[in-house]
Amino acid sequence: MKTNLPKKKDTIKCLLLYIEDDLPSIKLIERVLAHRPEIKLLPTMQGQLGLDLAREHSPDLILLDMHLPDIQGYEVLQQLQTNPKTRQIPVVVISVDDTLAQMKQMLSAGAKDYLVKPLDVKQFLHVVDQILKN
């Protein structure tokens, strides 16, 4: 017997790795992404652990803070860019450092975008959506 019930669509899951040592920043991104059930957030508060998780899980996008307790964000980005397993993963920097020199340095090192804290949520979601679309 056939039924005319609509088939449940599978939701596409995207994995987003957030390397950030500030717990309130992590909680903000968790709250924002709670409205996007297709995105799974994997937060870590250490740069080295973030590198390990990136190699292990191959996330669809990495959000990266500049000032981490163990490794600076620039070094994390460089290691991601030089590793064949992680060099294709897009990275968006989210930092309180809004100096033009810092932004230029990170973008020329391979970051796809650079967002400044306090975070503009609409801009953040637009950037995430654009990157995950591609």
Image (tube, rainbow, N blue to C red):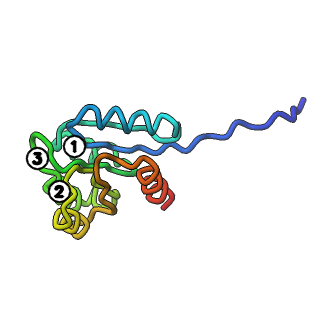
Residue drawn at the location 17% of the way across and 56% of the way down: 79
- Left or right, 42 with respect to 122, comes to left
- Residue 46: x and y, percent? 17, 38
Q: What element carries label 1?
A: helix
**Nearest to viewer (mark 3 / mark 2):** 3
Q: Residues within 10 Å of mark 3 (few under 14, many from 20)?
A: few
Q: Is mark 2 on a helix, strand or loop?
A: helix
Q: Residue 60 carries which label?
A: none
Q: How crowded is mark 1: few (under 14 residues within 10 Å), some or many (20 or more)?
A: few
Q: Which mark is residue 52?
A: 1
- Residue 109: x and y, percent? 21, 66
Q: Nearer the viewer, residue 127 or 53?
A: 127
**Nearest to viewer (mark 3 / mark 1):** 3
- Left or right, 20 with respect to 125, comes to left
**Three-letter residue code for mark 1:** Asp
Mark positioned earlier in the residue sequence (3 or 2): 3
Residue drawn at the location 33% of the way across and 43% of the way down: 17
The CA distance from mark 3 to mark 1 is 13 Å
- Residue 127: x and y, percent? 43, 56
The CA distance from mark 2 to mark 1 is 11 Å
Q: Mark 2 points at which residue?
A: 79
Q: Residue furthest right?
A: 1
**Three-letter residue code for mark 2:** Gln
Q: Mark 3 points at which residue?
A: 71
**Three-letter residue code for mark 3:** Ile
The CA distance from mark 3 to mark 2 is 11 Å
Discs 3, 2 touching: Cβ within 8 Å: no
